[in-house]
């Protein structure tokens, strides 16, 4: 006889909470769209430096036709949005449409108010602002780039190529086209902008205060664990392990520490056991454990 699974308790939000959440998202999507517009209109577009994806295609279309950037961003994204409607959900698609509409409006409001004509400054600061704005939008469950949505779809259907590889192929084509259209120096600056923006997006999504998970193998695991609890005020977990070479059973000490306390932890461990084996990994999100952040 099969036992019935217990359903997990689902938190039901009130209408007021749902409305507040949508208003908060709309505010952040609007802020993100305006930051992206500043990057495009004040730094990148006047200096003939482009972004990847649909925005990059729209920028090249603007250069060729001397048309309206906001119009092209909306027009080229529209078929991608309709394709995504079937699989990525109405909420995501609606929020994406809202963010793209806000970007189209913002680009018209800020149209070509140039901050600098220095290519390096335009590349770096344009990339930072671009990444910041896109990061806000991604963090609030929306997107500005239809090629990302299509890449997700194609990746599911093809099953032999990842989303990242598809996006890389699309952007490689866009930057190659930019090289022929705008010159290869502009194409290289565009690639640098894309790199800077991607790093800023990662920072926005993951936070500045990254944590690290630490695994420590030592014959003095208990002493090390007690010292970490007392000196750094962190929780530790002990796990039994078996040495592959020695075939001896050992105790592995596991904990999560913020990056600012990492040097202290290493010094503490090596002061107890200079031969201790330490492995660290980046942790992007910590929930449900006792974890001391900087300044706490």
Image: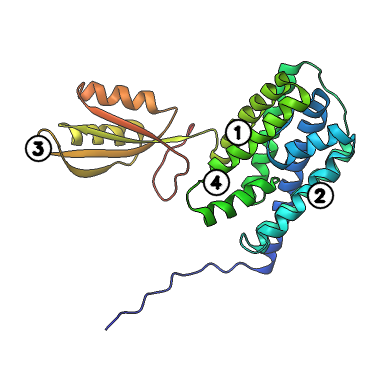
Distance from disc 3 to disc 2, alpha carbons, whole Å, reads: 65 Å
Image x and y of residue 40, in percent? 78, 32
**Within the image, what quadrant is residue 216 found in?**
top left
Residue at 30% x, 36% y: name it. 229
Mark toward the viewer: 1 or 2: 2
Q: Which residue is mark 1?
A: 198
Image x and y of residue 38, in percent? 79, 33
Q: Quadrant of the N terminus?
A: bottom left
* 233 relative position to 206: left or right: left
Is the residue under label 2 in contact with that under label 1 (CB below 8 Å)? no
Image x and y of residue 171, in percent? 64, 36
Q: Which residue is mark 2?
A: 75
Secondary structure at badge 1 equals helix
Residue density around tag 4, few if under 14, some if 14–19, many if 20 or more, within 10 Å: some
Closest to the observer: 75 or 234? 75
**Within the image, what quadrant is residue 145 found in?**
top right
Distance from disc 4 to disc 2, alpha carbons, whole Å, reads: 23 Å
The numbered disc on residue 158 is none
Is the residue under label 2 in contact with that under label 3 (CB below 8 Å)? no
Q: From this viewpoint, is residue 22 visible?
A: no
Q: Which residue is mark 3?
A: 248
Distance from disc 1 to disc 4, alpha carbons, whole Å, reads: 15 Å
Task: Give the mark, 1 or 4, whose residue is nearer the N terminus.
Answer: 4
Closest to the observer: 113 or 211? 113
Distance from disc 3 to disc 4, alpha carbons, whole Å, reads: 43 Å
Distance from disc 1 to disc 2, alpha carbons, whole Å, reads: 24 Å
Task: Give the mark, 4 or 2, whose residue is nearer the N terminus.
Answer: 2
Secondary structure at badge 3 equals loop
């Amino acid at each position: 006889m099969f036992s019935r699974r217990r359903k997990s308790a689902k938190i039901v939000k009130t209408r007021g909470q749902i409305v507040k959440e949508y208003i908060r998202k709309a505010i952040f999507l609007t802020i993100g769209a305006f930051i992206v517009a500043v990057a495009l209109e004040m730094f990148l577009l006047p200096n003939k430096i482009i972004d990847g994806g649909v925005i990059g295609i729209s920028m090249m279309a603007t250069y060729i036709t001397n048309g309206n950037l906001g119009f092209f961003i909306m027009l080229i994204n529209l078929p991608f949005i309709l394709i995504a409607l079937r699989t990525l959900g109405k909420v995501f698609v609606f929020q994406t449409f809202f963010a793209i509409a806000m970007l189209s409006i913002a680009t018209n409001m800020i149209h070509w108010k140039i901050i600098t004509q220095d290519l390096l400054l335009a590349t770096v600061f344009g990339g930072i602002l671009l990444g910041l704005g896109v990061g806000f939008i991604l963090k609030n469950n929306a997107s500005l780039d239809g090629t990302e949505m299509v890449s997700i779809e194609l990746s599911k259907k093809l099953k032999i190529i990842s989303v990242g590889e598809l996006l890389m192929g699309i952007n490689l084509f866009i930057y190659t086209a930019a090289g022929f259209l705008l010159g290869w120096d502009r194409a290289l600056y565009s690639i640098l902008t894309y790199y800077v923006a991607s790093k800023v997006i990662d920072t926005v999504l993951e936070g500045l205060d990254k944590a690290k998970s630490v695994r420590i193998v030592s014959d003095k695991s208990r002493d090390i664990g007690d010292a970490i609890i007392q000196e750094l005020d962190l929780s530790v977990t002990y796990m039994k392990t078996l040495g592959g070479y020695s075939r001896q059973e050992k105790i592995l000490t596991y904990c999560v520490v913020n990056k600012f306390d990492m040097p202290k932890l290493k010094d503490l461990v090596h002061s107890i056991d200079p031969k201790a084996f330490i492995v660290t990994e980046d942790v992007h999100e910590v929930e449900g454990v006792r974890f001391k952040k900087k300044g706490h």
